[in-house]
Amino acid sequence: MSDAATAIELDHYYPHPPEKVWRALTTPTLMARWMMEPIGFEPVAGNVFEMKTRPMPGQDFSGHIRGEVLEVVAPELLRMTWNDAQADTPTGWIISWRLRPEGRGTRILFSHNGFDPDNPLMQRARSIMSPGWAGMLDNLETLLVQED
């Protein structure tokens, strides 16, 4: 595990098979229903994509995400960069979803790494994003139930 000041780490169990959870993590129309609508996303290493959400000017966040898929091991791992597309410099953030079969369901180990522990703006972003990611994982659970 990472240092709490440099990462957001969440552990969530879903009573659904890994293939179903994977499909929700990697299918653009499903991603739009629980996270954000991706533009140009494909679960292929090297794929560059964008996502748009509500801007947060007070947090210096444009609401426009640009990412690149770094690693895909279906249905076990999805790892990508996660940057504010309009920032002067990339954040260096890495988002990972690790799926593990558990009983009849799936455990997701989610991480958002790369927060500079000495940068107050990065630490404020981490404190805001942590409950946001937890809420998205709850939204994912709702979607999975709806898709039964």
Image (cartoon, rainbow, N blue to C red):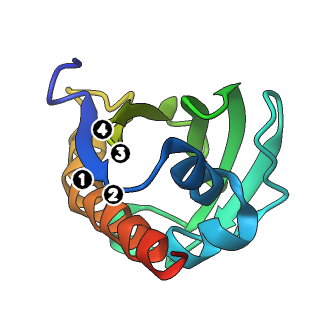
The three-letter amino acid code for the residue at tag 4 is: Gly
Residue named by callout 1: 130
Question: Is label 4 or label 2 in front?
Answer: 4
Mark 4 or 1 closer to N-term?
4
- The one nearer the camera, 75 or 81, is 75
Label 4: state its secondary structure.
Answer: loop
Mark nearer the viewer, 2 or 3: 3
- Where in the figure is residue 24, as x and y percent of width and height? 59, 59
Q: Amino acid at mark 3?
A: Arg
**Mark 4 in CB contact with mark 3 (< 8 angstroms):** yes
Numbered mark located on residue 133 in the image: 2
Query: Do residues under tags 2 and 1 come within 8 Å of each other at their CB atoms?
Result: yes
Q: Amino acid at mark 2?
A: Trp
Identified by mark 1, the residue type is Ser
Residue 112 seen in the figure: no
Earlier-in-chain disc, 4 versus 2: 4
Q: Are marks 4 and 2 in contact (CB under 8 Å)?
A: no
Callout in the foreground (4, 1):
4
Residue 64 visible = yes
Find disc 3 in the rendering and name its residue. 104
Crowding at mark 4 (Cα within 10 Å: few <14, some 14-19, many 20+)? few
Q: Mark 2 vs mark 3: which is more N-terminal?
A: 3
Q: How far apart in space, not on screen, are marks 4 and 3 (Cα)?
A: 4 Å
Q: Marks 4/1: CA distance?
A: 27 Å
The numbered dot on residue 103 is: 4
